[in-house]
Image (tube, rainbow, N blue to C red):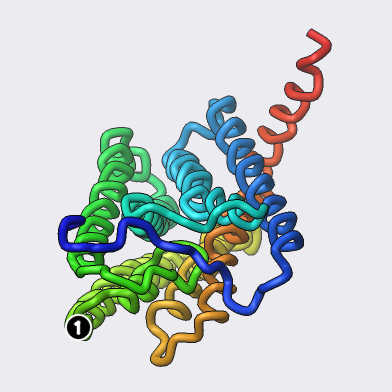
Amino acid sequence: MRNESMVIEFILLGIPHTEGLETMLFALFLSFYIFTLIGNLLILLAIVSSTRLHTPMYFFLCKLSVCDIFFPSVSCPKMLFYLSGNSRAISYGGCVSQLFFYHFLGCTECFLYTVMAYDRFVAICHPLRYKIIMSHRVCAILATGTSFFGCIQATFLTTLTFQLPFCGPREVDYYFCDIPVMLKLACADTTALEMVGFISVGLMPLSCFLLILTSYSCIVCSILQIRSSEGRRRAFSTCSAHLTAILLSFMPVVLIYLQPTPNPWLNATVQVLNNLVTPMLNPLIYSLRNKEVKSSLTKVLQQVAFLPEK
């Protein structure tokens, strides 16, 4: 793959039309990145330290937090590096790694949201059989499957992109290596590959979204059959956080990869929101409306606060 390419490194030009704003963007993105890491680490600690949260729902939430730690780490450290005045160069291998891990973690999260919707479907529509259906073995298989199929999708898209020859130019008009900008730099006809990639990138989220929609259609029907208003409120409350996270995750994919005429500045802005803001908001979304998580988080923060006194 690399022998066919004359380019051994690329230059990341960053977010379009932001010249002269490097210092402000560095401070802003660094803040987002730090809050993302801290928020998701606290969610992990809260779930691991509380036996009440050792259930399938929080097991999948744990994996989502792990993905939300690594997902922004694919592009953010390099972006912060060159925004602080350092080199914008990225090696060929580094570019391949960025594209692979971005789509691997993104696809894994997409499959994970689908699995979490199925978990809520079983919990609300089949509560008496929940522990049997969502056994430890089933949860482990589903969690492993999200990473396995995410890896297959990312491998396919990365191979599809970097089988092309790159002989110049080497300026990537973006802040990280992604499929649309890399295809523009290829020294070959990419029409067929663009179509295959478009179908692949579009088909996977669409399939996941339809499965999620099916799960929640059944959930809504079951909730409407609950007689007590308190029971309906609690059922809707357990699903609202997941639905909010789904909308924040799927909308950027639609805007970036399925728009007829790409807009570089819009794409970069939406991608930053997807890479940094959504992973930062997920801990808030899942904790603010969940008393058990808030209680466990309070205990974790109290332990951290009193740690120096021990």
In the image, residue 93 sits, relative to residue 164, either above or below, namely above
The C terminus lies in quadrant: top right
The quadrant in which residue 235 appears is bottom right
At 38% across and 82% down in the image, what residue appears?
A: 258
| Amino acid at dot 1 | Asp
Q: Is residue 72 rendered to the left or right of residue 32?
A: left
Task: Please say whether residue 118 is visible from this viewpoint.
Answer: no
- In this view, the residue in front, 11 or 77, is 11
In the image, residue 258 sits, relative to residue 122, either above or below, namely below
- In this view, the residue in front, 89 or 65, is 89
The N terminus lies in quadrant: bottom left
To which residue does mark 1 refer? 189
At 34% across and 78% down in the image, what residue appears?
A: 184
At 20% across and 67% down in the image, what residue appears?
A: 160
Near mark 1 (Cα within 10 A), the count class, few <14, some 14-19 or many ≥20, is few
- In this view, the residue in front, 178 or 20, is 20
Question: Residue 233, percent across and down?
Answer: 63, 61
Question: Residue 83, percent across and down?
Answer: 64, 57
In the image, residue 144 sits, relative to residue 285, either above or below, namely above
- Which residue is at the far bottom? 261
Question: Residue 6, percent across and down?
Answer: 24, 63
- Which residue is at the far top? 310
The quadrant in which residue 274 appears is bottom right
Task: Please say whether residue 177 is visible from this viewpoint.
Answer: yes
At 30% across and 39% down in the image, what residue appears?
A: 132
Question: Residue 254, percent across and down?
Answer: 43, 78
Q: Secondary structure at mark 1?
A: loop
